[in-house]
Image (spheres, rainbow, N blue to C red):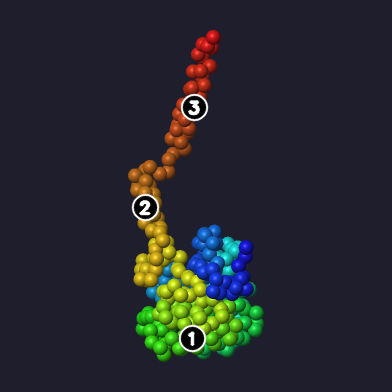
Amino acid sequence: MKKTVRSISKMKGGEKIAMITAYDAIFARLADEAGADMILVGDSLGNTFLGFDSTVPVSLEMMLHHTAAVARAKTDALVVADVPFGCAHFEFGRLLDDCRALCQKAGAEAVKIEGGAKMADKIRRLCDAGIAVMGHIGLQPQQVLKLGGYRKFGKTREEIDELVADAKALENAGVFSIVLEMCDEAATEAVTEAVGVPTIGIGSGPKSDGQVLVCTDILGLSKYTPPFVKKYADISGEILKAYSQYVGEVRGGAFPVSSQKKGETATKSTKSAIRPFTERACSPRAT
């Protein structure tokens, strides 16, 4: 059954929400078949698929390209696209145009915007325009240049209160859910209890209404994996094994097999299959 903003909102306090990132149709289809509730086309594609050191270099054009690829998978999971670095801080008209492009041109069903109470007014106006918005507080990776690195949030009472205030402001603005990234477990619990929309944690403990992980982290494809991640497979090892076998067979002449050899193999196989029948036909009938 197709997941919508409404069905996701109803999962608050009930069954845990599972969200996985994807950046193309193949990974989106697999996430959907696994039963993910939402697929996030994250600007994390910058430091996973595109080779950047952070999400900062990711442009709107890149997000449109990858969101469209995910949307073409036609998933039951709700497709959410990140609004990339800087775009949410343009004047509202330009932000609306960017979000419209993500939805109209690329096929996103919702957008995710980093920022708390300071972004509430713009988010309210986006929601009024008919765009579904997911909030994002705690660690905001697009702020990495200002922060000078990544850290955990909500370790002090003051920070917890600020996170709760941000979450309430976003809820009042109309977001249907809120990502909590790298938040202390106590802060995650406080925010989750304070708002009526689902919270989606990443590196924030088990107290949220759901979880999101980057697909390459789940699959063991990432060169660096954050300490909070659980790696569910070592696909990198399997790919390396297959690639190495291919390279070795090409260099050793084992691949490809010539059509002549294929024909000889097929002929031998056919003769082997026919022989028992011909031998049986030539044998005297039992009496």
- The location of residue 188, given as percent across then percent down, is 45, 79
- C-alpha gap between disc 1 and disc 2: 48 Å
Residue type beneath disc 1 = Val
Mark 3 or mark 1: which comes first in sequence? 1
- The secondary structure type at the circle numbered 3 is helix
Which numbered disc, 3 or 1, marks the residue closer to the eye?
A: 1
Q: Check the image and name the residue furthest to the top.
A: 287
- The secondary structure type at the circle numbered 2 is helix
Rendered-image quadrant of the N terminus: bottom right
Query: Label 1: few (<14), some or many (≥20) within 10 Å?
Result: many
- The location of residue 40, given as percent across then percent down, is 52, 70
Residue 65 visible at all: no
- The secondary structure type at the circle numbered 1 is helix
- The location of residue 105, given as percent across then percent down, is 61, 72
Residue type beneath disc 3 = Ala
The reply to whether dot 3 and dot 1 touch (C-beta < 8 Å) is: no
Residue at 47 percent across and 82 percent down: it is: 190
Residue type beneath disc 2 = Lys
Query: Label 2: few (<14), some or many (≥20) within 10 Å?
Result: few
Residue at the disc numbered 2: 241
Residue at the disc numbered 1: 164
Mark 1 or mark 2: which comes first in sequence? 1
The answer to which image quadrant residue 148 occupies is bottom left
